[in-house]
Amino acid sequence: MLDRAANAPELPAEVARRRTFAIISHPDAGKTTLTEKFLLYGGAIQMAGQVRAKGEARRTRSDFMKMEQDRGISVSASAMSFDFGKYRFNLVDTPGHSDFSEDTYRTLTAVDAAVMVIDGAKGVESQTRKLFEVCRLRDLPILTFCNKMDRESRDTFEIIDEIQENLAIDVTPASWPIGMGRDFIGCYDLLRDRLELMDRADRNKVAESIAIEGLDDPKLAEHVPADLLDKFLEEIEMAKELLPPMDPQALLDGTLTPIWFGSAINSFGVKELMEGIGAYGPEPQVQSAEPRQVSPAETKVAGFVFKVQANMDPKHRDRVAFVRMASGHFKRGMKLTHVRSKKPMAITNPVLFLASDRELAEEAWAGDIIGIPNHGQLRIGDTLTEGEMLRVTGIPSFAPELLQTVRAGDPMKAKHLEKALMQFAEEGAAKVFKPGIGSGFIVGVVGALQFEVLASRIELEYGLPVRFEASQFTSARWVHGEKAAVDAFSAANKQHMATDNDGDLVYLTRLQWDIDRVARDYPDVRLSATKEMQ
Ligand code: G4P
């Protein structure tokens, strides 16, 4: 269990101002639009529209393939840093497609909070729920943005109830919408007692903000039409009675989420949300590791790889490892210890992802995300330190849910295929199993779309057409136990045995029945569906 209290005192000012978070949402709820407005307010882009123009568009299947091929684009959108007031925001992109849930899970290990965007008319949708569950596994603090309030949306209480019931989390209103759909005029900011009025004429204009001295201030009536005001005051009365007040500790514990209402496309409510992330969102948190946890207050540098992206330039087989800094003040050129290999590594060309461009990172603090170009030494789950043998924990690898056999179109190219597969495995894009009997490889993924993306990347990046074919197996389990027991088990189940891309032994399964049989017949052998990356 993490000791978050260890984080409380004396964070260096540079660390304390950092807010590292991801946005989770169902497709179409407005993640791209909101990201764009974040960058706009962060001064990172001059004009709305640039993020979309860069291809961070909705992920229909064809868009996605194209985006995956256009490596540079997805990389620059993977992590974005920008300043907002006194804060430095690091926004980490979560893959949009549900087929990439494992990647999403690992991305969420690199952030300290999540912003959940929901569509005011649709409420909590399937993908929101799934991503929320992943956040819950890590007790991540969640801030909620209810978008598209300029359209006909659900009743405010109904939206809040749905979140509370569906996601089993308390909700506290940080703002309250006034009017709805065509009558929506803005929000009352409950945290700061301000009236925010939306400008429908200019989508990029920041809302007019009027300071209000409490709810009986006559100024309210000057700005809000009488019928809307009556309804608003009635609702607020009820909200105060029925809903919990803002509690920063409950937010940090992941048991309460504040909700802001707004319209990303109209730049409305976004600034208040950003102020909320600054004021209530957590600063960099302690990181679980072995043999001891790492505090961001420590002066020595430690960081871990949560994502690897390869072949950004197909001509050079370079890769970028995305590293979340867990502690210390990193400076370019530093020599860090790559804990897994115990070898020193000079970090000479780290990159920082400032909105749309990559830039050399001269320095980085706990909470920041830097990209380290390398030739394959850095893998997901690796830890970098100033010499201490620390290993960051909690970055799992999940058993695949779909398996297929892969063959090179040209049988003479089997070696090339192996190389390509190993590389994607290191990137975390797939699991590769080499069966003990027979030739060829079995590839495991979490979602079917990944096979298509893999086939297209292997062809594009290695010039190697491949075929994926049905396999008799459906999943894999890692095998644990005393050597003698495991050896006896392997010998008796040769048809099922394989090694994964790290050389670890797995048992390939066809049905749940296989797993039950092992539990029954081999009590000294344990099968597991997850493995810690290291
Ligand atoms: P996503 O990344 O979560 O998939 O959503 P995205 O931002 O792409 O938004 C999905 C659609 O919702 C887009 O419309 C976008 O313009 C619209 N949208 C986003 N925020 C708001 C809002 O506050 N109010 C309203 N009314 N619409 C909003 P589209 O028609 O699919 O695309 P486009 O033609 O606008 O680009």
Image (cartoon, helix red, strand yellow):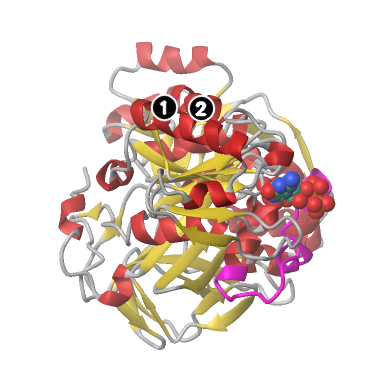
- Amino acid tagged 1: Met
Q: Quadrant of the C terminus?
A: bottom left
| Residue range (magenta) | 40-64
**Image point 77% across, 44% down: which residue?**
452
Q: Nearer the viewer, mark 2 or mark 1?
A: 1
Mark toward the start of the polypeptide (2 vs 1): 2
- The answer to whether residue 91 is above or below residue 516 is below
Residue 459 vs residue 392, the one in the foreground: 392
Q: Quadrant of the N terminus?
A: top left
Numbered badge on residue 157:
2
Q: Quadrant of residue 88?
A: bottom left
Dot 1 crowding, Cα within 10 Å, few <14, some 14–19, many 20+ = few
**Residue 192 shown left or right of residue 187 in the figure:** left
Q: Which residue is mark 1?
A: 238
Residue 130 in view: no
Residue 347 painted magenta:
no
**Residue 429 shown left or right of residue 134 in the figure:** right
